[in-house]
Image (spheres, grey):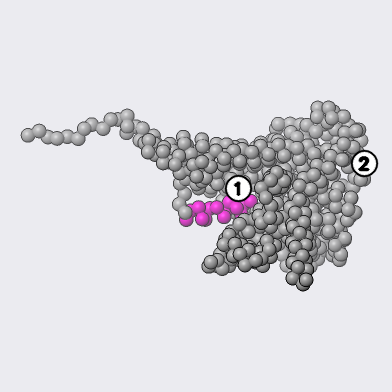
């Protein structure tokens, strides 16, 4: 019966397509597993030779020198120092800009300013590194003569403008999403626009804005080329932003560009560092996503 | 006759009102300081870049290989590598991304697996690029034995671009009205036929826009490709996907890391070419989006 054969063929085609589509969707789950496994396998090999406690507490990082020290603290410190400087600048600016754009700016102003901020997000990080090394550092050296050519301050400042679009854009969406009823209630009780913004809208948006900052911070600690170019290649356990430091990401680049034999202990260090970085960004990302979900759920009933 | 005078305004209210106006002015001024600072930084970056590198761009620069002498060095291998990697990345990422988006939007039921996939996609979007580089190094370069090749680089960038492509494709699919699907199903089409012949064609422009934006992000990335072994001094053109290669951002990084200012000029010129490429891609994406918005007359 021809009709039924055609129908059966269409049925199997439908099934096959479903399997292919399902496989495509599973790639994302497979990717996360692959990241965990590929980092984990080499990292385990590393930790068989270097005990975890030494990795976490030793105060020097010199795996490529003759006398090898494997303390990750200098790299973590360099990463957080630069990211910290960036956040100190980016959070106030980002929240201010987001509040202004969401609550006060006219449609015309927003239409012009939003793309400008988006452009900042699209600039390649190598260009940011170029700018930090050849413009910002010499400029700062005019005011701070003791600033070394490679330092943490210059990439920190430039990194602030790199994460600013992330913080500003997510915060603006959050503030925009605060239900109108909250503003109306505040104004009806006699508050001014400013009081409404700062005492009703922003507190309501609080968890969402924190989520934006966490995601921005995660982006900051994961940034690679900017800090590799402008911060230097010297692991340095210091809080002084005028000195050269090396971040976790810059170290991975340094080893990748060198000729370190595969399977050696030095090769495995990039996976140990990578795993540390991955776990950190994972924690910040998941917490940020969780807070954003909670914000959306809290205000769903007002929609 | 009594003169009626207005009641005396309380000075307290006047003080409060004046403070209120001052605070509002302070807030708006700070917001604008932040905005102007941001715009100035953007202008400074572009200004410094063009001042340093624009004059270096000429035919010789675009068609020469890197060299130890800065006047003779060029970006031939770099921009060819960039285009090669970009097209290969698109070829790998598009089917996977669109397939995943179609599955999640049209076929999947809301069960734990779907939620797991969505959580994964959101999480993968936030993972630093260099982690993808380490993934590519282990999985593509070593386990799949692709070597430090264009193919390994393209696979790595494809995996990195997937979350953005999937999210953009889902948005495009969601924008197609439900009535189109219902009409097709009512006429006897299977679910896949509905998607393939009715929903997908209408969603393609939106999908393309999202893909182009994802790719433009990928070609600006140097970190993952450095990790999988892209070289910084490549004096040949990659002929097959299994050849070693370099890309524009890596070449620029290599030059900016050298002490000689002539190499810095080369780096600036290479970055200008990269920016031109990004601008071209984004313009195409915006053009597609505008054309797509006009098509919607249903």
For the point 53% across and 42% down, the residue is: A300
x and y percentages locating residue B153 in the rendered image = 81, 55
Instruction: Decide whether residue A118 is among the magenta residues.
Output: yes
- In which chain is the residue bearing label 1? A
Q: Is residue B201 left or right of residue A225?
A: left
First-in-chain label (2 vs 1): 1
Q: In this view, does A220 lie to the left or right of A112?
A: right
Q: In this view, does A217 lie to the left or right of A189?
A: right
| Helix, strand or loop for the magenta stretch, by majority | helix
For this orientation, the residue located farthest to the bottom is: A2
User: Badge 1 is on which residue?
Assistant: A165
Quarter occupied by residue A19: bottom right
For the point 70% across and 43% down, the residue is: B112
Local SS, label 2 = loop
Which stretch appears magenta?
A: A108-121
| Whether residue A276 is visible | yes
Local SS, label 1 = helix
Structural crowding at the residue carrying mark 1, measured as other residues with C-alpha within 10 Å and reported as few (<14), some (14–19) or many (≥20): many
x and y percentages locating residue A296 in the rendered image = 57, 42
For the point 66% across and 47% down, the residue is: B110
User: Of residues A298 and A45, which is closer to you in this image?
Assistant: A298
User: Badge 2 is on which residue?
Assistant: A264
Structural crowding at the residue carrying mark 2, measured as other residues with C-alpha within 10 Å and reported as few (<14), some (14–19) or many (≥20): few
Quarter occupied by residue A160: top right
User: Of residues B188 and A98, which is closer to you in this image?
Assistant: B188
């Amino acid at each position: 019966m021809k009709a039924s054969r055609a129908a059966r063929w269409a049925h199997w085609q439908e099934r096959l397509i479903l399997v292919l589509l399902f496989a495509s969707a599973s790639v994302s789950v497979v990717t996360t597993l692959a990241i965990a496994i590929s980092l984990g396998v080499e990292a385990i090999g590393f930790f068989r030779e270097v005990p975890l406690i030494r990795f976490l507490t030793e105060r020097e990082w010199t795996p490529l020198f003759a006398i090898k020290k494997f303390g990750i603290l200098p790299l973590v410190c360099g990463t957080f120092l630069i990211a910290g400087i960036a956040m100190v600048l980016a959070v106030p600016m980002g929240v201010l800009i987001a509040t202004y754009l969401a609550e006060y700016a006219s449609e015309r102003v927003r239409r012009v300013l939003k793309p400008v901020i988006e452009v900042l997000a699209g600039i390649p990080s190598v260009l940011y590194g170029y700018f930090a090394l050849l413009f910002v550092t010499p400029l700062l050296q005019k005011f701070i003569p003791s600033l070394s050519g490679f330092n943490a301050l210059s990439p920190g400042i430039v990194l602030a403008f790199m994460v600013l679009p992330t913080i500003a854009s997510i915060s603006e969406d959050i503030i925009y999403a605060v239900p109108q009823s909250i503003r109306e209630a505040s104004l009806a009780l006699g508050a001014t626009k400013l009081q409404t913004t700062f005492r009703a809208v922003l507190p309501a948006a609080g968890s969402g804005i924190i989520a934006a900052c966490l995601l921005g911070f995660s982006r900051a600690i994961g940034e690679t080329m900017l800090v590799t170019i402008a911060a230097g290649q010297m692991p340095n356990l210091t809080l002084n932003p005028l000195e050269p430091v090396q971040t976790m990401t810059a170290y991975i680049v340094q080893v990748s560009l060198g000729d370190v034999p595969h399977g050696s202990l030095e090769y495995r260090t990039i996976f140990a560092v990578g795993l540390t970085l991955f776990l950190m960004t994972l924690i910040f990302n998941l917490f940020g996503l969780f807070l954003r979900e909670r914000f959306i759920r809290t205000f769903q009933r007002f929609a | 006759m009594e003169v009626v005078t207005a009641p005396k305004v309380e000075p307290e209210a006047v003080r409060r009102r004046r403070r209120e106006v001052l605070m509002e002015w302070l807030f708006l001024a700070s917001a604008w300081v932040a905005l102007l600072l941001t715009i100035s930084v953007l202008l400074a970056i572009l200004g410094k870049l063009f001042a340093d590198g624009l004059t270096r761009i000429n035919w010789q620069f675009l068609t020469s290989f890197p060299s130890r002498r800065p006047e003779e060095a060029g970006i031939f291998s770099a921009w060819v590598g960039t285009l090669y990697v970009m097209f290969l990345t698109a070829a790998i990422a598009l089917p996977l991304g669109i397939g995943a988006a179609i599955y999640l939007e049209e076929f999947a039921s809301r069960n734990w697996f779907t939620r797991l996939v969505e959580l994964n996609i959101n999480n993968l979007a936030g993972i630093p690029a260099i982690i993808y580089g380490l993934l590519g190094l282990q999985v593509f370069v070593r386990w799949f034995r692709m070597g430090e090749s264009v193919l390994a680089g393209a696979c790595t960038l494809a995996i990195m671009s997937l979350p953005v492509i999937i999210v953009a494709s889902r948005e495009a699919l969601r924008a197609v009205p439900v009535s189109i699907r219902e009409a097709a199903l009512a006429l006897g089409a299977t679910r896949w036929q509905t998607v393939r012949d009715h929903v997908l064609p209408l969603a393609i422009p939106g999908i393309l826009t999202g893909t182009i934006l994802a790719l433009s992000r990928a070609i600006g990335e140097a970190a993952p490709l450095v990790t999988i072994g892209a070289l910084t001094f490549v004096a040949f053109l990659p002929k097959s996907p299994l050849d070693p290669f370099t890309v524009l951002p890596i070449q620029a990084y290599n030059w900016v890391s050298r002490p000689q200012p002539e190499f810095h000029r080369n780096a600036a010129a290479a970055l200008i070419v990269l920016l031109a490429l990004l601008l071209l891609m984004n313009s195409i994406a915006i053009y597609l989006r505008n054309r797509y918005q006009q098509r919607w007359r249903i």
